[in-house]
Image (spheres, rainbow, N blue to C red):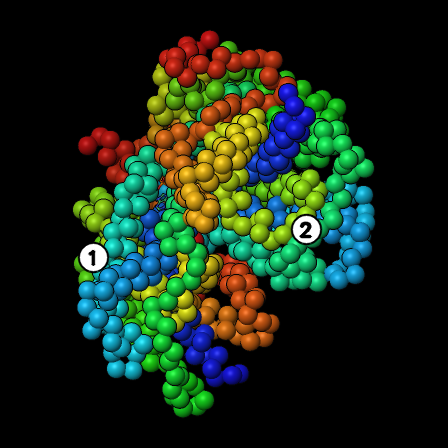
């Protein structure tokens, strides 16, 4: 069930996403410290590490929300480290946020629709010059958005403003919203945090299904069980650095990891 | 270049610089562009005028010019009163308006808009009380003394420059060498953290208003002494003030003063080259170039 | 009702509707995008002067006019002002929020200065007269003339309203709302926030320019004095009173505030002796200034408030607007 150890081959240029020697400095704090990570096509990799290890910051760098102080990020072989964030989705990178960021006053369906890419109705004049084309595209988009809401079991709520959703539902909404953009690679920041067991199973299920459809996934998660169930390979970060990486079982038995991370739970 | 132009530019620049210090402080600590700051300049000038004539009626001796200057002891006394009153006015506006908006956690841009409303109300109130007719501290004409190198200045002008220089140094020392100055810088770095670290944020805010309004009042008195007093005098200075605050780098007191002098000199040069009626456009051109080339200003940090 | 009264009411409403157009423009910038423009008067002036130059008959003592049809003048006004807004926005929108405010303030000051001093183009302090008025051939019949002019303004406002609502409910409007709610999330979804803001700012500016042009052609002459900061302030008061973010609110606010403004002129003037009228005018501005601050404090959402907009093709879903007060609905 898990695409383990030998990852499928990639672009001719190497891995799908590859970060090398990334550094992110916040004033005196080095949140990411010469960190490297690679994600291959179709792979699902877990990213774990104690609180404050720099996982979310690494995500922000890969997703373009932050620019690295130094280092390189290649997506499909193209260097993108200093590119603006809104360009990243066109490169096939979609992300969710650790603390979900739905558009609170917009309806659930509209939230998902904002994920659609390249709609001609996003250009001012097309709305007046080719209203038929805009409407047709919008109908297609709505159909797709509804299917995605179905996929994350939010269909009944599509006309409600997103602010009424519970924490877990917001995570699912974000997932549907980013899927609307058809990203090749999805970065999931703690999709299961604060989610009740039923929703958790749903999320695990959906993530597995997406991976089965061929999407590459990088997953930050504190729930080791979940990581073990989902990921063939786990990367461990601590204090902004790469601590180790390997199969989930090996990693959770690794002494340094236990000291840095699991040890703090056991203590 | 005409040396006299340098003198005019320096004097206008000193007034702009004093006003810009207030703008830059409110901007860096209260975090909004205060469009009502120009009104502190006008109110300062009118309050000083009112106090000075009051002292004059109390004792005619106070009106007798001091040494080479055009004014008597009534003016320095009045300035003390006016500085206090202008600071009080700023604190009053903060209590009635900005403080309440802060409590409602209003967006920054709502504060900007409120300052715009306050500016209009305060200015028109001056017009209501004093009418729009220009008034003067003193009608006496002063002879400009040669300073060498073709430079000439009246005693009033030289005094204004000296006072501006002293004030900038004093404010700079206050900000860098005293406890309240350190608190102010901490709040400008990060208000929440500073609050958590036990800094009295409200005291810092009060200090900002008192300092900004006090300097504005003195700038207003200088403008009134060297030019004239009108309800629009502060509002007309607003664009140069913003240009100087941004050129100097938001939050930098020496930057604001230096930039004020640059704006003042550029205006004087502009007046010489294209005519006095275009003076106000000079600040706009400077503003555009700063935003285009170096939006963080001379002494500001890039975001 | 007497003919004079009808003509007066028509005149009043026409004037109010020119302000409504400005308000609609400001609503695109502020209400829908959150961009603060302190130079409304300057942008309105650009539109007024451009249209006047394009449409007035050739004048020997200044550049232009070109004697073009009124509609060309209006179009030119909207384009020129849109372009000016685009440049100002391009310069500042990527920077901190209030730099835009400061820059637009600078634009207003500079436009005022140019209008006053560039005599060979703008006519200097006396401005430009003989701006062609729509239906000028009917000027002999005040009633028909004023009603037809009112009709023109109503058509302009209705068309603009429909176009803006259309846009607001389009994918473009949806992205704009998303950016306003959470820029980081919108960026992560590939939306170029700066571009959308800039577009909104330019459109709003173009509408203000159009407003300036219609007003100029309705009044028949323009001068720098018409475009002082007070105008900016009035338009702001109108939008805030009506409810920013709401196009109907923008129109309502314009009519209402213009009504209060016109009425207060009479009321305050009657309280002061003739030689104190300048003072009376100043007092009126103080009251409006205080009023605006009070609204910002007490009822920042205005009379109508912002309405929840849903994209066109979803409108028939009609969500229950009161869901906010209910507990989270169960997962279905
Ligand atoms: N924008 C920022 N400015 C300053 N410091 C930051 C910023 N973002 C993150 N940090 C700091 O960087 C460090 C790493 O934070 P990050 O959010 O990446 O950790 P994390 O591994 O995701 O932790 P968690 O498991 O708790 O989510 C923390 O010390 C955090 O305080
Ligand atoms: Mg995190």
Does the residue at mark 2 contact the one at mark 1 (Cβ under 8 Å)?
no
Secondary structure beneath dot 1 equals helix
Q: Crowdedness of circle 2 by 10 Å Cα count: few (<14), some, many (20+)? A: many
Secondary structure beneath dot 2 equals helix
Question: C202 or C266, which lies in front?
Answer: C266
Residue C141: tell me if it is visible: yes
Q: Crowdedness of circle 1 by 10 Å Cα count: few (<14), some, many (20+)? A: some
The structure residue drawn at horizontal position 53% and vertical position 83%, both measured from the top left corner, is B1
- C271 to the left or right of A112: left
User: Where residue B241 sits: x, y (%)?
Assistant: 43, 60
The structure residue drawn at horizontal position 45% and vertical position 70%, both measured from the top left corner, is B264
**Which chain letter matches label 1?**
B
Q: Quadrant of the N terminus of chain C?
A: top right
Give the residue number, with chain letter if any, for mark 2. Answer: C49
Q: CA distance from mark 2 to mark 1?
A: 52 Å
- B136 to the left or right of C221: left
Q: Quadrant of ligand 1?
A: top left
- A86 to the left or right of C141: left
């Amino acid at each position: 069930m898990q695409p383990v150890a030998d990852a499928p081959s990639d672009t001719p240029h190497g891995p799908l996403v590859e970060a090398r020697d990334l550094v992110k400095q916040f004033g005196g704090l080095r949140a990411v410290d010469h960190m490297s990570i690679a994600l291959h096509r179709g792979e699902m990799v877990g990213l774990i590490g104690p609180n404050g290890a720099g996982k979310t910051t690494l995500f922000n760098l890969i997703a373009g929300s932050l620019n690295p102080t130094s280092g390189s990020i290649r997506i499909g072989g193209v260097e993108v480290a200093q590119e603006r964030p809104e360009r990243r989705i066109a490169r096939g990178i979609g992300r969710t946020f650790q603390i979900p960021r739905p558009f609170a006053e917009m309806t659930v369906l509209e939230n998902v629709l904002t994920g659609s890419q390249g709609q001609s109705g996003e250009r001012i004049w097309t709305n007046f010059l080719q209203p038929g084309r805009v409407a047709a595209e919008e109908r297609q988009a709505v159909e797709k958005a509804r299917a995605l809401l179905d996929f994350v079991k939010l269909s009944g709520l599509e006309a409600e403003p997103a602010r009424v959703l519970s924490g877990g539902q917001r995570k699912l909404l974000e997932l549907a919203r980013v899927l609307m953009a058809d990203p090749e690679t999805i970065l999931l920041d703690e999709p299961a945090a604060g989610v009740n067991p039923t929703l958790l199973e749903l999320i695990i299920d959906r993530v597995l299904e997406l991976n089965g459809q061929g999407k590459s996934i990088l997953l930050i998660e504190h729930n080791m069980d979940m990581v073990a169930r989902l990921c063939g390979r786990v990367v461990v970060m601590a204090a902004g650095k790469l601590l180790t990486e390997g199969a989930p079982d090996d990693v959770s038995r690794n002494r340094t990891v236990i000291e840095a991370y699991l040890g703090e739970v056991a203590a | 270049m005409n040396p006299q132009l340098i003198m005019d530019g320096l004097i206008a620049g000193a007034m702009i610089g004093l006003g810009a210090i207030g703008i830059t402080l409110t901007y860096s600590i209260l975090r909004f562009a205060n469009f009502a700051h120009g009104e502190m300049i006008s109110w300062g000038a009118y309050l000083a005028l009112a106090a000075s004539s009051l002292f004059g009626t109390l004792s005619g001796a106070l009106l007798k010019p001091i040494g080479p200057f055009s004014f008597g002891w009534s003016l320095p006394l009045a300035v003390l009163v006016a500085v206090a009153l202008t600071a009080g006015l700023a604190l009053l506006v903060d209590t009635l308006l900005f403080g309440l908006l802060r409590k409602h956690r209003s967006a920054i841009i709502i504060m900007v808009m409120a300052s715009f409303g306050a500016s209009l109300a305060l200015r028109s109130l001056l017009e209501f009380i004093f009418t729009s007719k220009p008034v003067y501290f003193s009608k006496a004409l002063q002879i400009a003394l040669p300073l060498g190198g073709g430079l000439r200045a009246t005693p009033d002008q030289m005094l204004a420059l000296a006072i501006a220089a002293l004030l900038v140094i004093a404010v700079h020392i206050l900000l860098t060498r005293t406890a309240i100055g350190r608190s102010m810088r901490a709040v400008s770095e990060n208000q929440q953290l500073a609050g958590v670290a036990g800094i009295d944020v409200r005291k810092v805010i009060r200090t900002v208003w008192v300092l900004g309004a006090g300097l504005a009042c003195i700038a207003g008195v200088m403008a009134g002494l060297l030019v004239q007093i009108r309800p629009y005098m502060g509002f007309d200075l607003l664009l140069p003030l913003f240009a100087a605050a941004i050129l100097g780098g938001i939050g930098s007191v020496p930057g604001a003063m230096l930039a004020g002098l640059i704006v003042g000199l550029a205006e004087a040069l502009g007046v010489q080259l294209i005519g006095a009626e275009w003076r106000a456009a000079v600040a706009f051109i400077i503003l555009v170039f700063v935003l285009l080339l170096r939006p963080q200003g001379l002494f500001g940090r890039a975001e | 009702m007497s003919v004079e009264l009808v003509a007066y009411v028509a005149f009043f409403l026409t004037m109010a509707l020119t302000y409504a157009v400005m308000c609609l423009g400001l609503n695109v910038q502020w209400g829908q995008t959150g961009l603060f423009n302190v130079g409304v008067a300057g942008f309105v002036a650009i539109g007024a002067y451009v249209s006047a130059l394009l449409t007035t008959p050739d004048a020997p003592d200044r550049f232009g006019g070109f004697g073009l049809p009124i509609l060309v003048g209006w179009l030119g006004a909207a384009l020129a002002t849109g372009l000016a807004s685009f440049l100002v926005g391009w310069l500042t929108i990527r920077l901190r929020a209030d730099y835009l405010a400061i820059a637009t303030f600078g634009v207003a000051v500079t436009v005022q200065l140019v209008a006053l001093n560039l005599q060979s183009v703008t006519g200097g302090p006396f401005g430009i007269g003989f701006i062609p008025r729509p239906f000028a051939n009917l000027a002999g019949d005040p009633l028909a003339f004023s009603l037809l002019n009112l009709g023109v303004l109503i058509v302009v406002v209705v068309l603009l309203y429909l176009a803006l609502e259309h846009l607001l409910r389009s994918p473009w409007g949806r992205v704009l709302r998303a950016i306003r709610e959470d820029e980081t999330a919108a960026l992560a979804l590939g939306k170029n926030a700066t571009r959308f803001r800039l577009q909104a700012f330019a459109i709003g500016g173009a509408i203000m320019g159009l407003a300036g042009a219609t007003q100029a052609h309705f009044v028949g002459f323009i001068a720098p004095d018409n475009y002082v900061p007070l105008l900016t302030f009035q338009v702001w008061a109108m939008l805030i009173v009506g409810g920013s973010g709401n196009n109907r609110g923008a129109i309502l606010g314009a009519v209402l505030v213009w009504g209060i403004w016109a009425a207060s002129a009479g009321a305050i003037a009657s309280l002061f002796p003739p030689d104190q009228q300048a003072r009376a005018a100043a007092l009126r501005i103080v009251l409006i200034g205080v009023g605006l601050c009070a609204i910002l404090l007490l009822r920042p959402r205005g009379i109508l408030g912002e309405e929840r907009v849903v994209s066109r093709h979803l409108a028939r879903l009609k969500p229950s607007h009161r869901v906010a007060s209910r507990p989270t609905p169960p997962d279905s």
